[in-house]
Structure formats: structure tokens, C-alpha cells
């Protein structure tokens, strides 16, 4: 069996490196940071880890249904494609900054893209 | 509904109920204080293998290993077998040796505790009064030969423990002292790293301890302390800190006053804002935040956005319990 994207990207260590870069970009982005308001930093970092583990196709317990539930409240508060695009942008930029090869970034983006409908409650 | 087994007895736990509430509801006597996973007073041990991840966050590896968890955070996913802490294992005896005012509302309490375990300045202990009333206080001194622990305790109007300490406690009185806890302290690695410390009110207690610890280890990086309060009269140890900043080249001290115009030698504004203005780039810094929970929540995010890594941000929010 071929190695998973998660392992090829560098597993847990890669996730840890990406999380801070990514979350800093998200928090500094006026287009989307309101969704991340008043949340505890450590808990958020843990959730971003879950996000990356998922985007890398790594071990996680989430289903599309979970993504729907988790983001449902945000959809009520206006979460739409433009916000999703912004998150995708930061995902790509963070991985580029970490010198992850373009084709692996592409794979990660495709995985994240695959939950768009669930995240946006469509 | 899940089942909680303690010794020979079974207790029930409602679907969204945390273990602490379930046991208190069924008259099991458990010490607790903050109810939000900070003070670790309600630490219990689970002897079978069940998922506890969330209720173990922030615990030491060694505790996690043994199945310790915070009962105030734990909503059981399945039945659990629980061991209660033997109170005597967790607390040792202390005796008040000094109580004197640091300013109009903060008292210096020095407690001699011969059996205190190894600790780091900046950690906290839970102090317990004879009748069981328990509160967390941060240790402000590095370990002493005399086995004394220093605390700075601010009077909260109507507060049970702090008013008792201010109004009634005398030299010679006994107190119980828990094991040292918490992870807001100095580790003697990366000595060239910049250290930013921001504290409000009695949040100076752990920070002063952390500074002594860093200096005693020969920390070479810049150390910058911002201590804030609303009024000048609520700051303390101003002269000592100023003296220290003259004696130690890499130590800087900025006292801050958030209400009204600050007199000369003081900065105007809330301590964390003053710090953020003074230090626009925190990449690579170690950051310690102690005191007011809202200041800490806000500053944690800001320090992170300015480049500090989450792993390098240490905090002790002085949560006040509201359920007792
Ligand atoms: C990790 C940690 C470290 C800490 N370190 C320190 C330290 O170094 N120094 C320090 O001074 N403090 C510290 N604290 C805070 C300390 O533990 C206590 O919370 C604080 O001293 C107040 O306790 P108290 O018994 O005096 O007040 P409490 O009796 O607990 O009351 C707290 C406040 O709530 C109000 N109140 C109480 N009951 C009610 C009610 N029913 N309705 C409305 N209001 C109510 C009271 O008037 C009071 O203002 C720390 C806390 C934590 C979690
Ligand atoms: C790109 C696809 C996305 C994936 C794979 C994803 C994945 C996740 C995961 C795994 C969690 C943690 C769930 C939990 O355990 O609580 C989470 C939480 C969260 N997500 Fe997403 N997410 C995506 C897009 C977005 C977008 C576009 C936004 C908003 C701009 C967003 C905002 C949030 C917030 C605010 C939380 C925290 C919710 C809370 O605090 O409980 N996510 N996401």
C-alpha cells in the first residue's frame, strides 16, 4: 500500500509546524477572523490540528456529517464560499512557506475541497 | 447515562453531566475550586482504560499516564472506575510565619511548609483552611532552605478566603498546602531568549518568582516585566523592581496604570497594551501572563499574532470560582 499523504508530508511534525503559521494568517485576516472570535487559543490550536490532519488525509475520526454539524452555526452566521476560499488560500500559503512540494499541496487542497459542500451546509 | 464506580458503590452520571457535578449531586465529598480545568483541585484517578483526553489537557505526562483527569471537565463516554484522592496524600501542613501588607489591598503571606515537594516559582498550590475552604495561590519565591513559600493575596470584597487571610489569619496559624501544580514557570534552557512578563494585580506573585528563577539561572536574554493595575495604590514592590532594573542590565520594568493620567515613571494604559506597543515583534520570545483572565485571553492571541509560538506562551489566569 502506498504511503498516505499525511505520512509523505511529514506526519504529526508537519501538522505542528503548519498549524501556527496557518492560524496566525487566519486570525489576521479580516475577511474570516470573526468566525474565530473569543475562542480559547489552545483549544483552537487543537482544532486547527484536527483540520490539518484531515486535510492531509491522516488519522482522524471526522465524517462529512461532523463537518456539517461543526460548521452549521457558522453557516447560520453567514459562512459562504468566499470564506472557504480564504481558508484554502491560507492553507496553500502556509504549506508553501514550509516548502512542501507543490504536488503534495495540491493533494491536500483537493482533500479540503472535498468537504466544501459539507462545511458550507449545502 | 453512565455508571461511576468508587470502591463498592455505584453512582450515576447524566448524559451531559461532568463527573464532578454527578458525584457532588450524590453527596460524594470532593474538593474543587475553579471548575474550569485550571486549578486541578478536583483531580481524580480513573483505573480503567477509557478515553479521557479532554479532561487531561494540561496535565503532566506522568499524571496522564496514571489515569488522572479533571473531574470538572470530564463527561464520561462510558462507565468509569474512579479512585478518590486520599486528602492526606495531597496536602501537607503549613504554618504562617509572616503576614504583612504590600499595598492597600494585597497581603504578603509567608507559609513555612517543611514537607513541600520540589516546586518551581510561578507554580501554584491550593491552600486549605481548617474547614476545608480551598483556593489556589501562586508561589512567588524560588525554593528556600527555610522551606517557606511566599504568596501575594489580594483582597476581593466579599471573598471568603481572601477576606479571611486579610482580616483573621495570624502568625502561627496552620494551613494545609497542596502539592505544587501548574506549568507556568521558567525552564533553564534557551537562556538568550527574550522573556516578556505581563501581570495584573497579584499576578506579580508568580512573575516575580519566575524572574528570580531566570536570574538565578543566569538568563542572558532581555527580560521585560509590565505590571499593571487600575490605580497607583494597587501596584506594589515598585521600588524593589526599579532597583532590580538598575542592578541587572537585561531586566526592564514598566509599571502601568490604566485609570487616569499616570505620574512620571509610570506608563498610562493597560499593561498588556503598553507591552504590545513597546515590543512590536515577539517572534522567538517566551511570554508569561498572569492575573486577570480577560487580559490573559486577549494577550495570548495578540502575543501569538505578533510572532510568539503557542508553546512559548505560559499563563496563569486567576479564575475566581463563582459556584461556592
Ligand atoms: C491558578 C490560580 C492561581 C491564583 N493565584 C493567586 C494569587 O497568587 N494571588 C491572588 O490574590 N489570587 C490568586 N488566585 C485567585 C484565588 O484563587 C481566589 O480565587 C481569590 O483569592 C478569591 O477567593 P475568595 O475565597 O476570597 O473569593 P470567593 O469567596 O471565591 O469569591 C470571589 C468573588 O466572587 C464574589 N462572590 C462570591 N460568591 C458570590 C455569589 N454567590 N454571587 C456573586 N458574587 C459572589 C465575591 O464577592 C468575590 O468578589 C489564583 C487563582 C488560580 C485559579
Ligand atoms: C477547508 C475545509 C475545512 C475543514 C476540513 C475544516 C475542519 C474543521 C475541523 C476538523 C474542526 C474541529 C472540529 C471539532 O473537533 O470541534 C473545525 C472547527 C472549526 N472550523 Fe473548520 N474546516 C474547514 C473550513 C472552515 C472555514 C472555511 C471556516 C471559517 C472561515 C472554519 C471555521 C472553523 C471554526 C471557527 C471552528 C471551531 C469551531 C468551535 O470552536 O467549536 N472552518 N473545522
Image (tube, rainbow, N blue to C red):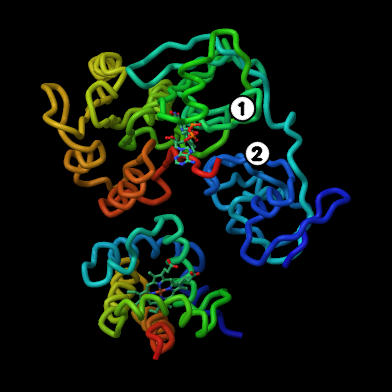
Report whether residue B187 is seen.
no
Report whether residue B131 is seen.
yes
| Chain letter for mark 2 | B
> Quadrant of the rendered structure where residue A2 is?
bottom right
Residue at numbered disc 2: B31
Q: Which residue of the protein is positioned furthest toward the right in this rendering?
A: B8
Residue at numbered disc 1: B128
| Chain letter for mark 1 | B
B7 versus B238 height, above or below: below
Residue B164 drawn at (x, y percent)? 51, 21
Report helix, strand or loop for mark 2. Answer: loop
A18 versus B71 height, above or below: below
Residue nearest the viewer, comparing B153 with B24: B24
Name the side, left or right, on which B213 lies relative to B34. left
Residue nearest the viewer, comparing B255 with B29: B29
Q: Which mark is residue B12?
A: none
Report helix, strand or loop for mark 1. Answer: strand
Residue nearest the viewer, comparing B88 with A3: B88
Mark 1 and mark 2 in contact? Answer it, CB < 8 Å. yes
Amino acid at each position: 500500500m502506498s504511503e498516505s499523504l499525511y505520512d509523505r508530508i511529514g506526519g504529526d511534525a508537519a501538522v505542528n509546524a503548519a498549524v501556527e503559521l496557518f492560524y496566525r494568517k487566519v486570525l489576521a485576516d479580516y475577511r474570516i477572523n470573526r468566525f474565530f472570535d473569543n475562542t480559547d487559543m489552545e483549544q483552537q490550536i487543537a482544532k486547527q490540528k484536527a483540520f490539518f490532519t484531515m486535510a492531509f488525509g491522516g488519522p482522524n475520526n471526522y465524517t462529512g456529517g461532523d463537518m456539517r454539524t461543526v460548521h452549521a452555526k457558522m453557516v447560520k452566521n453567514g459562512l459562504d464560499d468566499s470564506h472557504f476560499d480564504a481558508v484554502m488560500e491560507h492553507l496553500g500559503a502556509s504549506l508553501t512557506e514550509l516548502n512542501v512540494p507543490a504536488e503534495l499541496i495540491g493533494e491536500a487542497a483537493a482533500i479540503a475541497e472535498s468537504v466544501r459542500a459539507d462545511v458550507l451546509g449545502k | 447515562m453512565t455508571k461511576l464506580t468508587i470502591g463498592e458503590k455505584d453512582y450515576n452520571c447524566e448524559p451531559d453531566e461532568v463527573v464532578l457535578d454527578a458525584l457532588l449531586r450524590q453527596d460524594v465529598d470532593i474538593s474543587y475550586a475553579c471548575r474550569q480545568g485550571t486549578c486541578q483541585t478536583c483531580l481524580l484517578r480513573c483505573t480503567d482504560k477509557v478515553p479521557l483526553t479532554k479532561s487531561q489537557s494540561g496535565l503532566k505526562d506522568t499524571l496522564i499516564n496514571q489515569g488522572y483527569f479533571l473531574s470538572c471537565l470530564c463527561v464520561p463516554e462510558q462507565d468509569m472506575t474512579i479512585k478518590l484522592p486520599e486528602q492526606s496524600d495531597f496536602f501537607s501542613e503549613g504554618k504562617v510565619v509572616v503576614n504583612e501588607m504590600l499595598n492597600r489591598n494585597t497581603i504578603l503571606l509567608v507559609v513555612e511548609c517543611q514537607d513541600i515537594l520540589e516546586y518551581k516559582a510561578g507554580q501554584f498550590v491550593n491552600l486549605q483552611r481548617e474547614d476545608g475552604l480551598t483556593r489556589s495561590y501562586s508561589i512567588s519565591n524560588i525554593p528556600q532552605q527555610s522551606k517557606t513559600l511566599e504568596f501575594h493575596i489580594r483582597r476581593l470584597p466579599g471573598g471568603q478566603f481572601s477576606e479571611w487571610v486579610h482580616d483573621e489569619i495570624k502568625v502561627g496559624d496552620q494551613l494545609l498546602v497542596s502539592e505544587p501544580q501548574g506549568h507556568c514557570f521558567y525552564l533553564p534552557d534557551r537562556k538568550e531568549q527574550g522573556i516578556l512578563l505581563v501581570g495584573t494585580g497579584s499576578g506579580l506573585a508568580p512573575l516575580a518568582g519566575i524572574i528570580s528563577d531566570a536570574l538565578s539561572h543566569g538568563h542572558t536574554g532581555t527580560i521585560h516585566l509590565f505590571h499593571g493595575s487600575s490605580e497607583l495604590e494597587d501596584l506594589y514592590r515598585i521600588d524593589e523592581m526599579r532597583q532590580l532594573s538598575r542592578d541587572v542590565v537585561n531586566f526592564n520594568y514598566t509599571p502601568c496604570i490604566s485609570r487616569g493620567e499616570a505620574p512620571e515613571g509610570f506608563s498610562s494604559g493597560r499593561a498588556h497594551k503598553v507591552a504590545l506597543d513597546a515590543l512590536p515583534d515577539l517572534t522567538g520570545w517566551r511570554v508569561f501572563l498572569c492575573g486577570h483572565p480577560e487580559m490573559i485571553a486577549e494577550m495570548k492571541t495578540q502575543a501569538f499574532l505578533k510572532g510568539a509560538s503557542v508553546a512559548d506562551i505560559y499563563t496563569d489566569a486567576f479564575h475566581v470560582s463563582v459556584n461556592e
